[in-house]
Image (cartoon, rainbow, N blue to C red):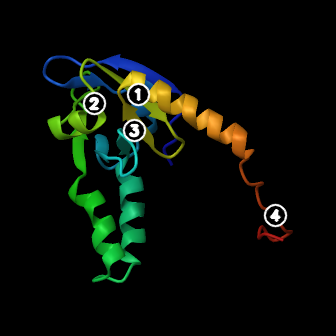
Amino acid sequence: MALFLSTFINKVDRKGRVSVPATFRAALGAQSFAGIIAFPSFRLPAIEGTGMDRMEELSARHDALSQFSEDHENLGVVFADSHELSFDSEGRIVLPPALSEHAGITDLAAFVGLGRSFQIWEPNRFHQHQAAARDRSRRQGLVLPAKAAQGPEGGTS
């Protein structure tokens, strides 16, 4: 499973090319597709990024919805809006204009690790979002849930 950690800010050239951080590329190394899958965030002015394995998992979860339901239709836009962005020989991708415009990315892009996925932000927007998220977390007293205890047979107890 790919794991994306840390935040990296990279330059975007005139052609929309940006280098994907080496640690992100390494995390994606065993994937069936040599690149990233990217789509506009539903909630934020950012680009969601992940590997093909995570998209396959999302597809399986989407398939569990009733095929002609409104939820199935609404969440299906994730796949319609997704772009397969191949790495070039230098580990760069080309950001499609629709994604760059959604995120407000022009000359710099912040790659933000989120565990099993990542986001690509315009750096100033990300710093504002990060400060607001930290504030909300403190006010709400958020903590990660405890890991379930393992029973003697490996199950939860």
Q: Which circle's residue, 2 or 4, is located before the other in the chain?
A: 2
Q: Which circle's residue, 3 or 1, is located before the other in the chain?
A: 3
Amino acid, disc 1: Arg
Cα distance between the residues tagged 2 and 4: 45 Å
Cα distance between the residues tagged 3 and 1: 29 Å
The residue where tag 3 is placed is 29
Counting other residues with Cα less than 10 Å from the Cα at mark 2, is it few (<14), some (14-19), or many (20 or more)?
many
Q: Which circle's residue, 2 or 1, is located before the other in the chain?
A: 2
Looking at the image, residue 41 sits to the left or right of residue 114; the answer is left
Q: Residue at x 28, y 66 (%)?
A: 76
SS at mark 1 in the image: helix
Counting other residues with Cα less than 10 Å from the Cα at mark 1, is it few (<14), some (14-19), or many (20 or more)?
some
The residue where tag 2 is placed is 104
Counting other residues with Cα less than 10 Å from the Cα at mark 3, is it few (<14), some (14-19), or many (20 or more)?
some
In the image, which is nearer the foreground, mark 3 or mark 1?
1
Cα distance between the residues tagged 2 and 3: 29 Å
Cα distance between the residues tagged 4 and 1: 41 Å
SS at mark 2 in the image: loop
In the image, which is nearer the foreground, mark 2 or mark 4?
2
Who is closer to the viewer here, 134 or 154?
134
Cα distance between the residues tagged 2 and 1: 9 Å
SS at mark 4 in the image: loop
Residue reaching furthest front?
139
| CB within 8 Å, label 3 to label 1 | no
Amino acid, disc 4: Gln
The residue where tag 1 is placed is 125
Rendered image: mark on residue 150: 4
Rendered image: mark on residue 84: none
